Image (tube, rainbow, N blue to C red):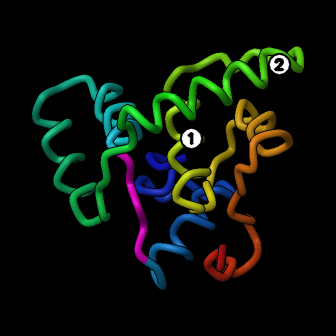
Amino acid sequence: MLIDALRGTPSPEALAFRRLAARETIVLGDVVLLEALRGVPTEAGARRLAERLAQFRQVAMLSPALAEQGAAQYRRLRGLGLTPRRLADGIIAAWCIAERVPLLARDRDFAGYVAHCGLRLQPLDAPSPAPDPG
């Protein structure tokens, strides 16, 4: 979705990303940065992409406390019969939940985190939600 937005692809998620980026600070987690950069086949291309991504606020997404929370969320989902497939998604979800930041994503692997762990998704066609007061 991030790469689609940077390429100008007209997907609903890419369009929502560009709308948000025009009016808000976009937070880019280091895990997302890693996922984006690992898909670039050349070092020169990776450097160009890293320069483009430097415009966003970059944050570290994992700490010992968040690792524990993420593992607890994983166990909760497993206990409900849902098995999250990707470790990176679990880290991203745990950070967004802890920081009360809505996630803009098209990956249905986040559905369990939304339904059972308190992850909020950024609506594709609506303005950004007000910050969570709690």
Image point 55% across, 52% down: which residue?
98
Circle 2: residue type:
Leu
Badge 2: residue crowd in 10 Å (few <14, some 14–19, many ≥20): some
Dots 2, 1 in contact, CB < 8 A: no
Foreground: 44 or 22?
Answer: 22
Badge 1: residue crowd in 10 Å (few <14, some 14–19, many ≥20): many
Please tell me which of labels 2 and 1 falls first in the chain. Answer: 2
Quick one: SS at disc 2?
loop
Q: State the quadrant of the C terminus.
A: bottom right
Q: Is residue 38 left or right of residue 92?
A: left
Which mark is on residue 94?
Answer: 1
- Relative image position of residue 115 (x, y in whole percent): 85, 42
Quarter of the figure with residue 82 = top right
Q: In 3D space, how far apart are the residues under numbered discs 2 and 1 (Cα atoms)?
A: 16 Å
Q: Can you identify the residue that label 2 sits on?
A: 82
Q: Is residue 27 magenta?
A: yes
Against 36, is 80 above or below?
above
Q: Is residue 84 magenta?
A: no
Quick one: SS at disc 1?
helix
Foreground: 65 or 109?
Answer: 65
- Relative image position of residue 100 (x, y in whole percent): 59, 62
Against 31, is 24 above or below?
below
Image point 20% across, 47% down: which residue?
50
Image point 57% across, 31% down: which residue?
70
Image point 83% across, 39% down: which residue?
116
- Relative image position of residue 17 (x, y in whole percent): 55, 64
> Magenta segment, principal secondary structure?
strand
Q: Which residues are magenta?
A: 25-29
Q: Is residue 26 left or right of residue 90?
A: left
- Relative image position of residue 110 (x, y in whole percent): 71, 37
Q: Is residue 75 left or right of residue 70?
A: right
Quarter of the figure with residue 69 = top right
